[in-house]
Structures are given as C-alpha cells and as structure tokens.
Amino acid sequence: MSFLQRTVVRALLVTAALASAQPTASETDLKAVYLLNFGKFVRLSGSAASSRPPTFNICVLGHDLIGHALDDVTAHESIDKRAVRVVRISDAYRATGCQVLYISPDEGDGIPADLAALGNADILTVSDAPDFLKDGGMIQFVTQQRHVRFAVSLNAVNRTHLVLSSELLRVALSVTGKIPEDQ
C-alpha cells in the first residue's frame, strides 16, 4: 500500500472513529466531515477521468441542514489538488458542476424526482433521508445507537463512471450491489 493510500485509509478511519467515539461532536459536524472525506474516496473511471473542473464542488440541495458545519470543515481543504467549494443549489438540474451532492431529507417525496433529474450523471449522491438508497441514491447516512454511519448502494454507483475505493466500502455499515468485474 502506497503512502497516499495509507494516508487516505487513516483519514477515513479517523472519520469513523470520530463518529463513534466523540459524543461532543454534533451529528451535523460528523456528516460534514464524512461529505468531505467521501470526495477523497471516489474517482472517475475511463475517459470521464480526463474532464475535471478546476474546483471540487460539494453541493447542497434543499433545506441546508449541514450549512455552517460543511463550510467550516471544507475551509482551506483540497481534493486532488483542487480547492473544495461548497455550493447551494435550488434544484437537481443545477447540479451539473457538483462532484458530491448532499440532498436534504426535507426534499421528502421529491427525492426520487431529484435523482431522476440527475440521470446517470457522475455525481456522488448522499442523504440521510429514509429510503434514500431504495430511491436510487448512492450513500445514505444512518444513525445507529447515536453514532453516524453510512450505507452504500453500488447499484446506484454502477450506473455512473464513479468508482468508490475499497477502503470506503470497508468501513460502510452496509454495502448492497456488486463491484463491477472490470474494476
């Protein structure tokens, strides 16, 4: 394992440790840290990898529950040598420049339509809305015994050019679907 891989694994493990060991950190703070770290564990495959915007955009759709915590966590951060920027968007059609999209649970019954609007776009979708994975989302925050964890749907990820690292999948609470054979 390379130095970079070891560093990335440590960052994800620290996030998981924070989620389970620090009752003083708010749930919102932990979700913000996860959103930033998810960006470090996802990559584009094939020809899609060559089209990278100059910034790494973590977008928030709907009522901004993560707000200031995400702004604080991402300040002065970079992913793949690109500055991380938090962008609030009013609808899913404005998500074209996003690499990670947090969809507020307040979107409720509109979440399936939001995900349908994204189609097979190479955007990592994340929410803490109930049934988010069943609706076609990629990563769902799950609170279990007062600890923030996450579940992954590879079926949703596999419809895009996104590839999630094995390190990320290893610390997920649950993973549904299969890793494509060509990865």
Image (cartoon, rainbow, N blue to C red):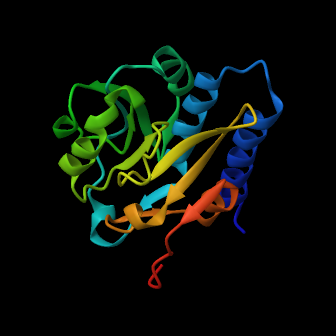
Work out whether residue 71 or residue 80 is closer to the camera in this orientation and state it.
71
Residue drawn where x is 24% and y is 41% of the image: 114
Q: Is residue 92 above or below residue 63?
A: below
The x and y percentages for residue 66 are 48, 22
The extreme right residue here reads 21
- 183 left or right, relative to 34: left
Which quarter of the rendering shows the N terminus? bottom right
The x and y percentages for residue 165 are 56, 63
Work out whether residue 104 or residue 40 is closer to the camera in this orientation and state it.
104
Work out whether residue 150 or residue 44 is closer to the camera in this orientation and state it.
150
- 10 left or right, relative to 165: right
Residue drawn where x is 61% and y is 66% of the image: 166
Residue 167 figure quarter:
bottom right
Work out whether residue 110 or residue 159 is closer to the camera in this orientation and state it.
110
- 13 left or right, relative to 108: right
Residue drawn where x is 40% and y is 62% of the image: 157
The x and y percentages for residue 90 are 22, 25
Q: Is residue 9 above or below residue 180?
A: above
